[in-house]
Amino acid sequence: MALFGQHPAARPTLLMASFPAAQKRHPRRRPSSHLYYVARRQCAPPATLAQTSPLDTKQRQKSMRRTTSSRSILLGQRTNPSALVTDKHWNALPRNYHNPKPICRGSVRRVLWRDVTRLQASNWETTVFDPNSPRFDLYKWLRMFVRLLDEEGLKQKRAGIVFRNLNVSGSGSALNLQKDVASLFMIPFRIGEYFNFGKKPEKQILRDFDGLMKSGEMLIVLGRPGSGCSTLLKSMCGELHGLDLDKNSTIHYNGITQSQMLKEFKGEVVYNQEVDKHFPHLTVGQTLEFAASVRTPSHRVKGASRKEWAKHITQVIMAVFGLSHTYNTKVGNDYVRGVSGGERKRVSIAEMALSAAPLAAWDNSTRGLDSATALEFVKSLRLSANLGGSAHAVAIYQASQAIYNVFDKAIVLYEGREIFFGPVGIAKSYFEEMGWYCPGRQTTGDFLTSITNPQERQAREGFAKKVPRTPAEFERYWRESKEYRTLQRETQEHEEEFPIDGSIVEDFRANKRDQQANHTRAKSSYLISVPMQIKLNTKRAYQRIWNDKASTLTTVIGQIVMALIVGSVFYGTADATQGFFAKGAVLFFAILLNALIAISEITSLYAQRPIVEKHASYAFYHPATEAIAGIVSDIPVKFLLAVAFNIVLYFLAGLR
């Protein structure tokens, strides 16, 4: 299968299958595919074929000189113009490969040379599909992948988003004071800070946002920190923990309401948070292969197995984001040594890319990446949008001009207000017509962001008293502009094409059901069944234990030492009435120390909680399956700890 890095020409069975038809067409000539097979399996390599003695006749030199340059390029070396396949190589072919009626060997040798040359060219072309090759080309791989999906009738999910009158607020304490000793005496005067009487101060974060992002489009979100970029992306993806969405706000995905999308198709709209959260002791390969395994569809191209699919897709994603060299390196964190910060950020990007969601939001995902890597990341999203129809909203600070030009639309935020939404090509001219000046060497992204900073923006000559200054004035100017009216018209046309609760819902359901594994509920948002989720989570739990062997061995050795100490204290206790109290003390310590082992797991459980929440939002697995897998994986470890402690204590304390 060409998808998995094997060129069809490398399969002898495929080539031999074409022999009878070719023999009927040319009874006196061996078909070229036959010679292709012979050249690959029986003859010496091309470098050996080229190292032959010069020919004496000028006629043979002239016949070979015409094809020398192309062969030299494909073979990667200098070739003698008069070199031909010698009798030594010809005679090395098996007898049954020769024609019953011999023909001119010179012509057959030229055909053999031609097929060897083709073999070299096909091998060179095959490398662009191999993710382990330095010549790997993502564009060609995606084109081939999409073509294979079309050939087998596998549909790709597409989704856009419309939000109108989007108002989001957050509740919390308006003022937090640093606690000190004097705070104890101020408690009677600050009862409201310690007791909740049902009144929470609310802060308006987003005000009356309107926008449209169609399938296959990319949206760049621009604004200073604190302007509401993260809140906008979270609201688009339904990550509303701690946020309140106004009841009059409307968000739908090509006619699918947000509540229905989060209930039935949770993994189709995903949000990549700014902070990297991973299991530190897993390697990069294990982390990404797990993500690929839980999102492997039931129907795969060319009938590939789940293991082959997950392995190959992981290699492709790692090659795209420059992570191939970190396959066996731990992800790490602030305390566990692993990959660098930029590589860890790329692991987060690759993990969410493996979810294959049709709509994704990326919150400052280029933080910690160099400019070249950030550009490659955005270009990979562009290819995914062009060929797969996915939609991406990306919040980027200090975007270069090359990155900015990749996007289709831009939205500018100013202290929680929308001051522009439209094509990236007209964003600069929109603010220039408003009266702002853009320096010659400033990028468009920096110019749009600087508009929201009073210390950076510069008014054009003669517009100092005409341009808006406050966020409310910018918003008023935006709502009175022709660009806003164009957005409203496009939104209305899009909603007429994709009405709410229209046929797109049934298409999503049919596509999801086609991708789900057997024994999976039809309304479940997960692609694999519960037993498969438990199996994969258990495998990952054992990988974490194996990669952190020092922690387990330290606990075992500590239990043995404690057993030796407690057992030596009660060693030689008499087996009589006077030893009843001592025997009871031994049993008490045995139960207590075995129970205290679980205290060390509390920290790890709290540490993995945000990771499990992230995976649940990606629809990787249900959190309950992770808990079950943790119990199953702990059984042998707990058994080993109990045996190491109890056997030593049992014989040393004389509990027989």
Image (tube, rainbow, N blue to C red):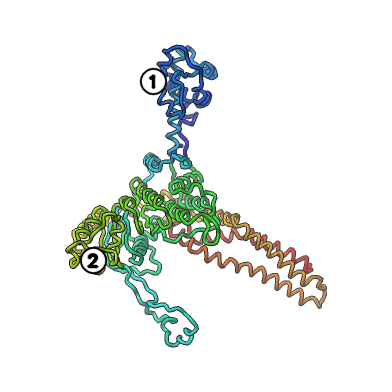
Q: Would you call the spot at circle 1 few (<14 residues within 10 Å), some (14-19), or many (20 or more)?
A: few
Dot 2: what SS?
helix
- Considering only vertical position in the picture, is 601 above or below 43? below
Of the image marks 2 and 1, the number of the one nearer the N terminus: 1
- Considering only vertical position in the picture, is 104 above or below 312? above
Q: Is residue 515 visible?
A: yes
Which residue position is annotated with label 1?
66
* Quadrant in which residue 264 is drawn: bottom left
Between the C-alphas of marks 2 and 1, the distance is 70 Å
Q: Using the image, tell me which numbered label, if any, was put on residue 580.
A: none
- Considering only vertical position in the picture, is 57 above or below 180? above
* Quadrant in which residue 211 is drawn: bottom left
The residue mark sitting in front, 2 or 1, is: 1
Q: Position of residue 94 (x, y in %)?
A: 54, 19
At a point 44% along the width and 20% down the height, the residue shown is 81
Dot 1: what SS?
loop
Q: Position of residue 624 (x, y in %)?
A: 51, 62
Q: Position of residue 293 (x, y in %)?
A: 49, 50
User: Is residue 358 toward the left or the right of residue 55 in the image?
Assistant: left
Q: Using the image, tell me which numbered label, if any, was put on residue 474.
A: 2
Q: Position of residue 159 (x, y in %)?
A: 33, 53
